[in-house]
Each structure stands twice: as C-alpha cells, then as structure tokens.
Image (cartoon, helix red, strand yellow):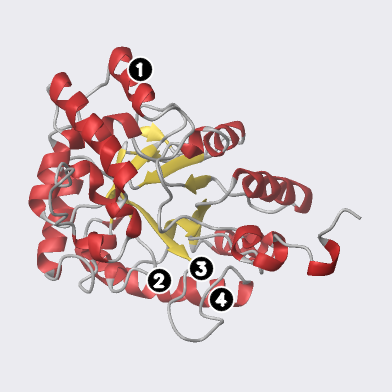
Amino acid sequence: MQYRTLGRTGIKVSPYGLGALMFATSIGNPDPGDSARIIHKALDAGINLIDTADAYGDSEEIVGRALKGRRDNVVLATKVSRPVGDDPNQQGASRRWIMTAVENSLRRLGTDHIDLYQIHRPDPATDVEETLSALSDLIHSGKVRAIGTSAMPASDIVEAQWVAERRGLERFRTEQPPYSLLNRGIEREVLPAAQRYGMGTLVWGPLGQGLLTGQVRKGRQNELRRAGFLKHVNDEHRIEAVERFVSLAQEAGLPLTHLAMAFAIAHPGVTSAVLGPRTMSHLDDLLAGVDVALTDDILDRIDAIVPPGTDVGVLDQAYVPPALQRTSLRRRPLGERTAA
C-alpha cells in the first residue's frame, strides 16, 4: 500500500479509506463480530484510515471495540453536526454541542483522542468563528489532532480559512465531499479550493452509493438495499451513464468497481477515497483492485461520458444551502416582483 500525506498535516493515510457507516447494525452489517473481522482485514491489507460519525448509529462503538490493541496504528476520523436525537441542540456546529459530542464520541470509540474531527455538514445557523474556536480548544487540549469538514461549498471553505487566519484559530485541514464517476461537480471549485489551501480531501461515495458495483443495470430489478429510500439510486439518467461505464470497464478488462475506485484516487486533489463495504466479499473485491492505474485513454473516455466538473443527477445526501431550501430567500414579496 502506498501512502499519501493528508494535506499539510504530515499525517500519512492510505489512498483507500475504510468508511464505517455499513458497520452500524441498524442499517448495515447486523453482526458486530463480522464487522470487526472486516476492519481487521482492511488494516492487515494496509488501509490505515477509518472514517465514522456520531450519527452512524452504533458504528463508533463497533469501531472502538475492533480497534482495541491496534488504535495507535490507525488514523481515526469521526464527525459531528448531524442530528443524533430529538433535542434541537443535539446537532449543528455550536460550541455547546461540539464540546458535548466529542466526549460522547471519545467514550464510544474507547480512545483518548480523535485524529480527524470533521463537521459532518455545514451549519449556517452557527458563526464559523464559533465553530473554529471550539475545535481549536479541542486541538489544544489534545483530544483532537486535526479538524475538517464534509460537503462544504467552496465559498464556505474560503471563508473558514480567512476566519482562521484573521482570528488566530486552528484551520480546517481536510474536506470530505462526494466524488465518483457519476458525480464530478467538486472538480470545478471544491477540489481547486482545497488544493489552494493545502487541505487533504477524503472523498465519499466513490461507488455511487452502489450504482457502480455492477449490480444495477438498465431494465433489471434494482436489488440495492438503498434503492428503497434513496431516489438517486433509481435515477434513469444515472443508470444510463452506468451502462456506458459498464461497457468501458469491460473493454478495459476491469470490474466496474475497480474502474470506479481507480478513477476516484487518480485526481491530484484527492488524498483518499472512502469505501464502505458491508461484507467481507465486498472488501475482498475492492482490495483486489488496489494496483489498478487508469491510462490517459481510459480517463479521456470517462470524460466523454461524464464531462469534468459535472454531476449526473443530485445525490439525496448532498448539502443544500438555505438559499435553495427556503423559498423566502429565492422570491421577493409578491408586491416587489414587478419591474414597474
């Protein structure tokens, strides 16, 4: 396994990271023992980055138990800000919640420090200075080594960097956006912004939330577990693009999963692609493709199917800013909508 430096942190991570969402018993693998074996096999193969979140059910507990005796060899990342209860203050990026949430994550993970603590989604209701101030205190206390974001727009990335510099606060060192053969929108602004500020990038969804596993084909019943609750998994335009990638992978003599993972880590702005296996066979398939390098010809043909900087459809889990969510921010009052 080759290792890459995570931005300018000096931390070395594997180009494949292990996502822990599918280790949550309520939505992924129902057997914690099997999840532990998957984690151990990934570590044995050289994967040293594990990414989880407080909103992933019991994932943190499962990861924590699996890492006993091996914690020092793992770059452990988790996240905060997604709702974890009915209390309106059990979410977001306020100092009040961050200070509580980090203690909960440390306890569940069974560790005294978190290597990378990430804001799971932007929180427009909280001043970024408030968030960075709280996270800076966690770094200074030794409970957190580095801080990052997930699904943050490029403009917010820039604002956060400026605030950190002007207020003398710790700055975000990483960003975790969606990226795959089907979703390349971050190539336009997010990746260039992250590269400009020396941030590491951990991309999620490199297999298109299951669409790029080879299990979903046009005209066939979609058997993906996520098909029942994620609209984009059944999007006809996305499935049409998948068919073209299936043909390209066959011509290249590669499984579709290997084509997808090799693409995700080929961009110079991507540090690591987070894979999310639910079973040992899923992990085995992905590990078999660690040596795949795509030629310029293959990458050119990928560009012809989904042009650089574009997305095929919108992900259900994509961050939607208030300017798009709230109609009052998009529509003037009725009496002010005329030109005369």
Residue under label 3: 81
Mark 3 nearby-residue class (10 Å; few <14, some 14–19, many ≥20): many
Residue 67 visible from this viewpoint? no
Mark 1 nearby-residue class (10 Å; few <14, some 14–19, many ≥20): few
Residue 129 visible from this viewpoint? yes
Question: What is the C-alpha distance between the residues marked 1 and 4?
Answer: 46 Å
Name the quadrant containing residue 29.
Answer: bottom left
Which amino acid type corresponds to the residue marked 1 in the rendered image?
Answer: Asp
Mark 2 nearby-residue class (10 Å; few <14, some 14–19, many ≥20): many
Residue under label 4: 97
Q: Quadrant of the C terminus?
A: bottom right
Question: Which residue corresponds to the image point at 31% horizontal and 73% vertical from the top-left?
Answer: 57
Which amino acid type corresponds to the residue marked 3 in the rendered image?
Answer: Ser
Closer to viewer: mark 2 or mark 4: 4
**In the current view of this chain or complex, which residue is farthest to the top?**
297
Closer to viewer: mark 3 or mark 1: 1
- Find numbered disc 2 in the image and state the secondary structure of the residue it sits on: helix
Q: Which mark is residue 105?
A: 2
Q: Are marks 1 and 4 in contact (CB under 8 Å)?
A: no
